[in-house]
Amino acid sequence: MKKAENIIVGISIGDLNGIGSEIVLKTFEDARMLEMCTPVIFANVKTLSFLRKSFESTAPLHGIDKLDQIVIGKINVLNLWREPIQLEYGVNNEIVGEYAIKSFTAATQALKDDLIDVLVTAPINKYNIQSEDFKFPGHTDYLDQELEGNALMLMVSGSLRVGLLTDHIPVNEIATHLTEALIRKKIQTIDECLTQDFSIHKPRIAVLGLNPHAGDGGVIGSEDDKLIRPVIKKMFEEGIMVFGPYPADGFFGNNQYEKFDAVIATYHDQGLIPFKTLSFGNGVNYTAGLNKIRTSPDHGTAYDIAGKDLANYNSFKEAVYLAIDVYKSRNEYAEISKRPLKTKEKHL
């Protein structure tokens, strides 16, 4: 077996009434995937076997009851529950949401305990996962609490990487959330991520303006000139290659994003609309800034096509690829960092 197969990819199954199980199974039907990693799906082997038949999938499943039973090179399914679940494709169901969170929290704990190397999460429904025990808007916020570091959503598709200063907050509250400390922290996180996770030396980072035309010199809002621009100037003087703020429409319209290693948008739709327009179906949501690696596809549960064998699994497969690549990059970076260059002694 190839050494790469020892990279253990934990997978939380997501909403079982959505397309999560379909895209997971379709991804690993290709035996070549098992030459890159060993998947461990946190679910139940009988549930997935039933779903596999409904999709006429050829992915062979190997049920295990403990993580020390993982078989390298097989599609392992960790049995988190034994009872049957009533599934109905395309239906928002709170009980199914409970199983999605059971899978996700167990996979996160395994990640914390170094029992898996990386985590790839299938889509969940942000509404049916809410309970007394889980009061988070999504994966990222929970991971930010459970893991070390400062979580930052980074959407990735090839050389296009889009991060966010603010995430899931109402548009009318964006300006009140922007502070010098927040902007500095996000830029620093992106810079460190590009260096250690993507092996980019002295990455170039662009920051988009909050207001139309980046405030147009204060005519359309003062935040860009009074807050964002001064932080960028200070950090550039400190050695980080960060530029902006740029008007978002012209920045993407003129393909300026191609000149940078990452783009930081000030709010969710400002960054996600152009990203998904350019790469939807092939993009990956990467949680940067944490001590552990988590990726996910760039789409949701897609209830409208669930169970119809229509789901495109490219984004999930790209999420697996990216998790593996980042894992390797981090290991290489750690190895280089602990082996300083030796200088030759001068012989007189």
Image: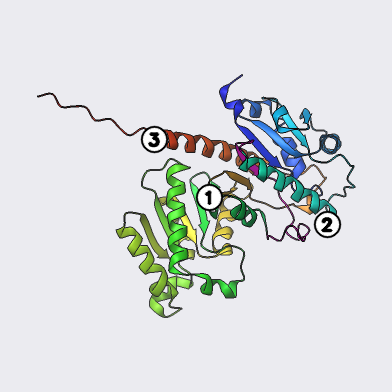
Name the image quarter holding the C terminus.
top left
In the image, what residue type sits under mark 3? Lys
Horizontal side of residue 29 vs 335, given as left or right: right
Q: In the visual, does 122 lie left or right of 56?
A: left
How far is mark 3 from mark 2, CA to CA? 48 Å
On the image, the x and y values in percent for residue 51 come to 83, 38
Structural crowding at the residue carrying mark 3, measured as other residues with C-alpha within 10 Å and reported as few (<14), some (14–19) or many (≥20) = few
Q: Which residue is denoted by mark 3 in the rendering?
A: 338
* Residue designated by label 1: 288
Secondary structure category for the residue under label 3: loop
Disc 2 crowd rating (10 Å Cα; few below 14, some 14-19, many 20+) is some
Q: Depth check: 56 or 287 in front? A: 287
Q: Which residue is mark 2?
A: 94
Alpha carbon of mark 2 to alpha carbon of mark 1: how far?
A: 29 Å
Q: Earlier in the sequence, mark 3 or mark 1?
A: 1
Please tell me which residue is depicted at 33% across the width and 63% down the height of the picture. 234
Query: Does the image show residue 145?
Result: yes
Indicate the position of residue 279 as horizontal and vertical percent values.
58, 49
Q: Secondary structure at mark 1?
A: strand
**x and y percent of residue 236 in the render?**
33, 58
Residue located at (58% from left, 37% from top):
321
Q: Percent x, y for residue 241?
A: 35, 54
> For the residue marked with disc 2, what is the amino acid?
Glu
Visible residue check, residue 282: no
* Direction top: furthest residue: 1
Which quadrant of the figure contains the N terminus?
top right
Q: Kindly indicate the quadrant of the structure image that contains residue 166.
A: bottom right
Near-viewer residue (225 or 335): 335
The magenta segment is 114-137
Q: Nearer the viewer, mark 3 or mark 1?
A: 3
